[in-house]
Amino acid sequence: MIDKGLIESENAAREDALRADYEALGDHLDRRGMDIGRVRDKVAAYGVAIPSWGVGTGGTRFARFPGPGEPRGIFDKLDDCGVIHQMTCATPSVSLHIPWDKAPAADLNAKAEEVGLGFDAMNSNTFQDHVGDPRSYKFGSLSHVDSSTRAQAIEHNLECIDIGKSIGSTALTVWIGDGSNFPGQTDFTRQFDRYLDAMKQVYAGLPDDWRLFTEHKIYEPAFYSTVVQDWGTNYLIAQELGEKAQCLVDLGHHAPTVNIEMIVARLIRFGKLGGFHFNDSKYGDDDLDTGSIDPFRLFLVFNELVEAEDRPGFAPAHMLDQSHNVTDPMESLMMSASEVRRAYAQALLVDRAALRGFQGDNDALMAAQTLKAAFRTDVEPILAMARMEAGGAIDPVAAFRASGYRAKVAAERAAVTGAGGGIV
Ligand code: LRH
Ligand code: MN
Ligand code: MN
């Protein structure tokens, strides 16, 4: 972990300016009838989970270019995640991917406690073959034509639940690569029936207080069709499985022009929004840093979430799911956690009474301007104040760089070569 004194001295150099900016923003919001302290408190209570796989350098189908100090396994990953949380105070939990992060539960719990983190949703993986497994997932997993392959995939998901139970997780996220690459390769209906049947068996293994998230994705690695291709199919799955089943929306898993915020609104309306994998994209499942391409879209998603905040039982899970190819992954994750909080803070600033009035009057221009007024507000002083008051860094990346953490772990962790493609 990074020395507290370093964070304090980094903050000392920035605190006066922050207080001045915060006060000015407070006055400004006051004139708009908004209380800055309320927004700051809500932002401070908002956490987003880090994907364990995000702290290593990702890659593309073509190459992977690892950076210095790549984590050697789950315990290094947890160290890195702990530092990200220390800097941002915005990432209190980690989402594990099995079998990538398989380790004895007692060791995982001890490490998590040491670095001040908890565990979020478990992610199963039947889009790759696992060493020692007799069956291959080349032609599918939970929807495979062969029943013993399906049984193996079901067993893996049940094992993920078991691991999760022993580390305090309460959700399982299932994303499958199943689909087809050629018209005619599979029978859409029979394939979906096999998937539903398998998922019912996974669902049956869920503890009472768990949720099951299914994640849709339009394409890749299957390039003609995927079994869980869109939110409609995802919704049907959640309906078919039962109350504990909900839909997970990965922002990168849609066609480029799809209106994601509207999907979010629909899923909320029917109690089936399970959570998010936040990232950004320009073309497909690019897994770029959250808010790096289209921050307005992220804001519009949060606008729907804030609108729904008071619904009974409304508690979507928030996770990042990104792949970092050209940046230090820890820095990208720090920035992304801030981007998620930024979108949340901006959405909290929407004048909802005014918006509803303009909607009722069919005043499209003013309704749009109401959203824009919130989106245009620079909420950075709120984010920085929430971090500082929680013991984090006013400027997380600057403090992280000043700490020399990357050089330190690079000296301890053997360098890795870049052979092979990355993960999805
Ligand atoms: C699939 C996906 C899914 C996986 C992760 C590594 O594209 O978004 O969430 O578990 O990537
Ligand atoms: Mn995802
Ligand atoms: Mn993805």
Image: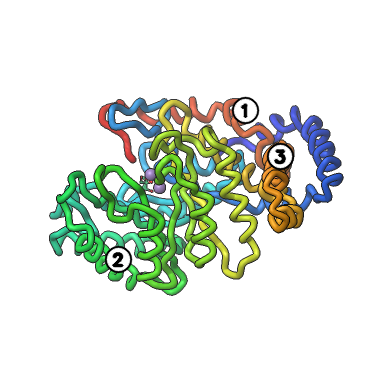
Q: Identify the residue at horizontal 43%, vertical 59% (top origin).
A: 247
Q: Residue 345, can we see it?
A: no
- Residue at 49% x, 54% y is 263
Q: Which element is circle 2 on?
A: helix
What amino acid type should be assigned to the residue bearing mark 2? Met
Asked if residue 73 can be seen in this view, the reply is yes
In the rendered view, would you say 233 is above or below 284? below
**Dot 1 lies on which element?**
helix
Query: Taking 37 as reference, is 154 above or below it?
Result: below
Tell me, yes or no, whether the two marked residues, 1 and 3, touch with CB atoms within 8 Å.
no
> In front: mark 1 or mark 3?
3
Hey, what amino acid is under mark 3? Val
Tell me what residue is drawn at x 53 percent, y 50 percent.
Answer: 261
Image spot of residue 386 (x, y percent)? 70, 45
Mark identifier at residue 379: 3
- In the picture of the structure, the residue carrying the numbered disc 1 is 398
Q: Earlier in the sequence, mark 2 or mark 1?
A: 2
Residue 283 is situated, as x and y percent measured from the top left of the image, at 41, 34
Alpha carbon distance from label 1 to label 3: 19 Å
Side of 363 where 81 appears, left or right: left
Q: Helix, strand or loop at disc 3?
A: loop
Comes first in the chain, label 2 or label 3: 2
- Residue corresponding to mark 2: 199
Residue closer to the observer: 147 or 32: 32
Residue type at mark 1: give it. Answer: Ala
Asked whether 393 or 279 is in front, the reply is 279
